[in-house]
Image (tube, rainbow, N blue to C red):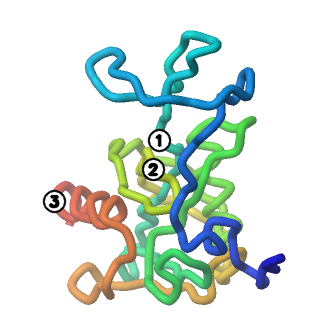
Amino acid sequence: MTTRKEGESPACLAGLIMDEKKHCHFCGALLTNKFVEGRIRKYCPDCREPIYENPVPATCIVVTDTACGIWLVKRNVDPKKGFWCLPGGFMELDETPEQAALRELQEETGLLGKIDMLMGITINPSPAYSSVLMAGYLVREFTGEPCAGDDASDIACFGLDRLPEIAFSSHRHFIRIYQSAYA
């Protein structure tokens, strides 16, 4: 049996590749592939229903600081361990996207923020989840002392002209939106 290291998600143990679904999550029957609604989908012959596979919802926040630029966190978990990114993460079942964004902000940075606006929605490819549906928010008002936490090993504020390599394409997308609209 493989054991998990601290900070390592189950997806890391599988080489960051999501296992292909083989059985119906309703009845347990073996799935087939069938052309349904214009595309090949997993299909349960017993239920006579397609199995819809959807993106995993997540959020990120562009946190601006008039004194230094934008706040980024350095990841201490895969994927992209050691890379910088916007604070953010996956939504829980019982929360809105805004609640998820603010929870992740506090967990990863120690900051309490007020969402100024939704910057947009995009898709980020993911070897672990196929695709992640990312909602990006802007926070210009926050309180607290920045402190790396949860799955962040460091936190720093970067000028827009001195940004490090950003881990995820969706985060780069929201940073570019901020730069074009506000910088």
The type of residue carrying mark 2 is: Val
Query: Horizontally, is 143 left or right of 182 in the view?
Result: right
Sequence-earlier tag: 1 or 3: 1
Of badges 1 and 3, nearer the viewer stands 1
Q: Secondary structure at mark 3?
A: helix
Mark number for residue 180?
Answer: 3
Residue drawn at 19 percent across, 55 percent down: 181
Q: Work out whether mark 2 precedes mark 3 in sequence or the reverse, and give the earlier one.
A: 2
Q: CA distance from mark 1 to mark 2?
A: 5 Å
| Label 3 crowd bin: few (<14), some (14–19), many (20+), radius 10 Å | few
Q: Where is residue 100 drawn, in percent x and y? A: 63, 48
Q: Which mark is residue 55?
A: 1
How packed mark 1 is, by other alpha carbons closer than 10 Å (few <14, some 14-19, many 20 or more), is some
Looking at the image, residue 30 sits to the left or right of residue 56; the answer is right
- In the rendered view, does 115 fall on the left or right side of 36? right
Q: Which mark is residue 169?
A: none
Which residue does the numbered mark 2 point to in the structure image? 132
Q: Circle 2 sits in a helix, a strand or a loop, which is it? A: strand
**Horizontal arrangement in the rendering, residue 53 relative to residue 69 (left or right):** right
Residue visible at 47% across and 79% down? 80
Residue 17 screen position, x and y as percent = 51, 63
Q: Do the residues under discs 1 and 2 have CB atoms within 8 angstroms?
A: yes
Quadrant assignment for the C terminus: bottom left
In this picture, is 67 found above or below 124? below
